[in-house]
Amino acid sequence: MNFGEIPIGIDLGTTNSCIGAFIHGKVKIIPNQNHSKLIPSIVSFDGNQITIGDQTVNKIHKNPEKVIYSIKRIMGKNPKDKDYKDLIKNLAYRNEINIDNEGRPYIQVEFNGEKQNYYPQIISSLILERLKQIAEDFLEKEIKKVVITIPAYFTDSQREATKIAAESIGLEVLKIINEHTAGALAYGIIDKYELEDNYSFFKQKKEQKNNIKDKNILVFDLGGGTFDVTCLELRNDDNIPEFIIKGHNGYTLLGGDDFDNILVEYCIKIFEQKEYPMRQKKEKIKIKRESEEGIYAINRLKLYCEKIKKTLSEQESANIYLENFMIIKN
C-alpha cells in the first residue's frame, strides 16, 4: 500500500517511543519489523555498527559501556539545573557524562575504534531516524514532516533540542505538542469525536450529537521517565468542542525507570544484608557499584526487575530467580 504524503506523529519517549499516522480517517500505530508498537529508546554502539530498538535491550547488561538509554532525561538540560545531579545519578551509565566548555552535557562512546562525543540531541536524532525508517517501510513513502510530543514542563532549551534532533535528519517539525494535549486529543478523537477530512476541525459523531456536556478531565501520563498530570476543561459551545488547559505539572524523576530502580535497590539491600556461610568469614557482601562486575550485575538485575514490575501490575507478589547474580569468592 502506498499512501500520499502524510505527516507522522512521534512520541519520543524516555524508555520507549511510538509512531502514529492518520490513515483513512483513523490513527494507525505503526509497528516495527517485529510487530512491536513500542520501540525501545536505546542506542547501541557495537564495533562499527549502530543499532536502535529491540536489538539493543539485552546489550544493556552485556556491554553497558556501548549502550545509551533514557537520554531524554538530560536532553536540553544544564548542569546548573537543580535536578541535574539526581537525573545523572539515576541514569547509572557505564559511560561518564561530561560537560563541554559551553555547559552542555555529552557522553563519550567508543565507536569505529575511537572515542567519540555524543550530545543528547544527537542520540535522539538517531532514535528519530530509526522511527522515520520504520514509518517509511510501512507506508512505502518518504516521510518529510512530523509532529512530536514532549512533556509539558520542558523548557525552551529542551524543546529546541528536540526540534534540532528532528531537523538534523531532514524532518520538518510541523508542531511540538505537549503530551497532555496529545492525551486530550486522543481522548476526544477516540471517545467522543472524529476528524474532518481536512484534519483541522472536530465534529461530533452522529449518534452523540447534542449529547456532549461540558466537563473537566484529568489526564495522567505516567511514562518511562516522567509523570505528568493535567486538568482540562471540555467545552461544547455551539456543537464545537474545545479543550482548555486549566493547569498542569510534572516530575522528571518519577516513571517506569524509577520503579525499576527502586526494585533494584530493594533487591540489592536484601542481597547485601545476608551472610554467606561458604565464605571463610561470615561477612556481608558489598556490591562495588563502580566495578565492571558490579555494573554488569546491576544492569542484569534491572532487566529482571522490569519484568517483575509488570508482573506486580497483575498480582500481589512475585519472585526473582537470578542465577550467579554475583560470583562470591572465598
Image (cartoon, rainbow, N blue to C red):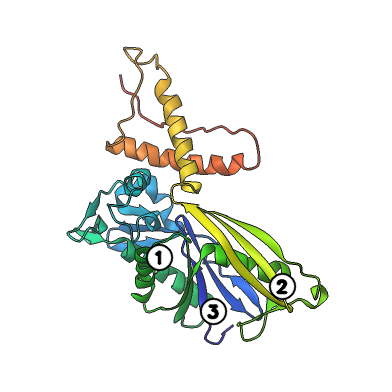
> Under tag 2, what secondary structure?
strand
Looking at the image, residue 309 sits to the left or right of residue 291; the answer is right
Q: Earlier in the sequence, mark 1 or mark 2?
A: 1
Give the image quarter of residue 127. bottom left
Q: Residue at x 37, y 63 (%)?
A: 158
Q: Nearer the viewer, residue 26 or 61?
A: 26
Q: Amino acid at mark 3?
A: Leu
Q: Are marks 2 and 3 in contact (CB under 8 Å)?
A: no
Q: Earlier in the sequence, mark 2 or mark 3?
A: 3
Report if residue 137 is visible in the image.
no
Tell us which disc is closer to us: 1 or 2: 2
Looking at the image, residue 65 sits to the left or right of residue 141; the answer is left
Q: Residue at x 51, y 76 (%)?
A: 8
Tell me the tag on residue 236. 2
Q: Amino acid at mark 1?
A: Ile
Tell us which disc is closer to us: 2 or 3: 2
Q: Residue at x 43, y 57 (%)?
A: 55
Q: Quadrant of the N terminus?
A: bottom right
Residue carrying label 1: 127
Q: Earlier in the sequence, mark 3 or mark 1?
A: 1
Residue 135 locus on image (x, y percent):
50, 74
Residue 288 locus on image (x, y percent):
30, 31
Vertical relation: 150 (above or below) 175: above
Residue 243 locus on image (x, y percent):
62, 69
Tell me the tag on residue 139. 3
Tell me the tag on residue 167. none
Vertical relation: 231 (above or below) 96: below
Q: Are marks 3 and 1 in contact (CB under 8 Å)?
A: no
Q: Residues within 10 Å of mark 3 (few under 14, many from 20)?
A: some
Question: How far apart are the alpha carbons under marks 2 and 3?
Answer: 36 Å
> Under tag 3, what secondary structure?
helix
